[in-house]
Amino acid sequence: MSLPVGVVTLAERHGGHAVTREIYAAMIAEVAAHARPLRGRAWPARRSVSVHLLGTSGTVTTIAGVHLELRRYERRRVDGCWMSRRRGDRA
């Protein structure tokens, strides 16, 4: 499933520069609406089966850079980066 809600897209749809609490709440609501089909989905119950989330740009590459402790973005290090949920949450 691909969600059409990258940072730039959200900023363009919601006015971009000055983000009030109300605008931020509207952004969250938009993302939640796109992700709603994931709720109640039958995820694997066994630990031997994994679920992977794939991110291709924007925020997810920033999180990978933080995880890798990069001072500057290095595409060859970020591309193909794998993180556990716990590490992603910490980044």
Image (cartoon, grey):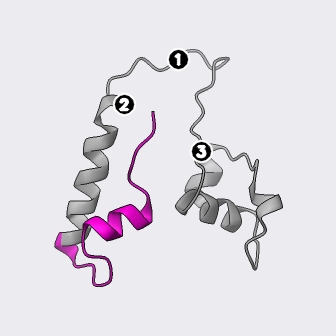
Residue at image coords 32%, 83%: 17
Helix, strand or loop at label 2? It is: helix
Which residues, given as a range, are shown in magenta? 1-22
x and y, in percent, of residue 53 in the image: 56, 38
x and y, in percent, of residue 62 in the image: 61, 66
Q: Looking at the figure, which quarter contains the N terminus?
A: top left
Q: Does the magenta stretch include residue 74?
A: no
Which residue is label 3 attached to? 85
Helix, strand or loop at label 3? It is: helix
Which residue is label 2 attached to? 38
x and y, in percent, of residue 43 in the image: 47, 20
Residue at image coords 45%, 39%: 2
x and y, in percent, of residue 40 in the image: 32, 23
Residue 91 in view of the camera: no
Please determine whether, in this image, residue 45 is positioned above or below residue 73: above
Frontmost of labels 2 and 1 is: 2
Real-space CA distance between mark 2 and mark 1, rounded to the nearest whole angstrom: 13 Å
Q: Earlier in the sequence, mark 2 or mark 1?
A: 2
Q: Is residue 76 left or right of residue 66?
A: right
Please determine whether, in this image, residue 24 is positioned above or below residue 19: above
